[in-house]
Amino acid sequence: MARFDLIAVYMLANRKNGTIYTGVSSDLWARIGQHKSGKGSHFTARYGCDRLVWYEIHTDISPARHRERRIKTWPRQWKINLIETTNRHWDDLSMTLPFV
């Protein structure tokens, strides 16, 4: 059964202006832990995407999944612009995740 501790759409990167991965999770804390251990997805493990550079909290998983699908269709520059509106230096935000 899925947990719904911190529903979020998120983007990971391997470095500033590097490879970007977009995902959605019903438990962002656990999912980031999986990515950091190399077990989150084949893509993130292959490209070293373990730096949480952007996330958006949702109260329901359905709109979060919809948002993820939309972001995945965006041009790369739009994703970069979205990241840099809140995280200009592409810092790893995983240690600043809120407790809700």
Image (cartoon, helix red, strand yellow):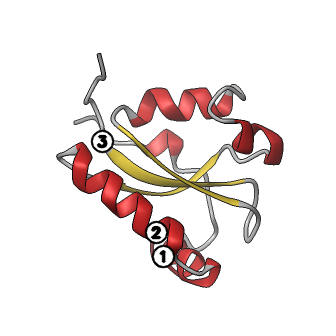
Direction from residue 70 to residue 74 in the image, left or right = right
Dots 2, 1 in contact, CB < 8 A? yes
Quadrant of the rendered image containing residue 26: top left
N-terminal label among 2 and 1: 2
Q: Which mark is residue 82?
A: 1
N-terminal label among 3 and 2: 3
Dots 3, 1 in contact, CB < 8 A? no
Give the residue drawn at x 32%, y 59%: 66
Give the residue drawn at x 54%, y 35%: 32
Q: Amino acid at mark 2?
A: Ile
Give the residue drawn at x 27%, y 30%: 5
Secondary element at tag 1:
helix
Q: CA distance from mark 2 to mark 1?
A: 10 Å
**Residue at which label 2 appears:** 71
Mark nearest the camera among 2 and 1 is 2
- How far from the left and from the top, in percent, is residue 38? 72, 29
In this rendering, the answer to whether 38 lies above or below 58 is above
Direction from residue 21 to residue 85 in the image, left or right = left
Direction from residue 94 to residue 8 in the image, left or right = left
Q: Amino acid at mark 1?
A: Leu
Q: CA distance from mark 3 to mark 1?
A: 19 Å
The residue carrying pointer 1 sits among few (fewer than 14), some (14 to 19) or many (20 or more) residues within 10 Å by Cα, namely: some
Secondary element at tag 2:
helix
**Residue at which label 3 appears:** 7
Give the residue drawn at x 48%, y 76%: 82
N-terminal label among 3 and 1: 3
Q: Which mark is residue 23?
A: none
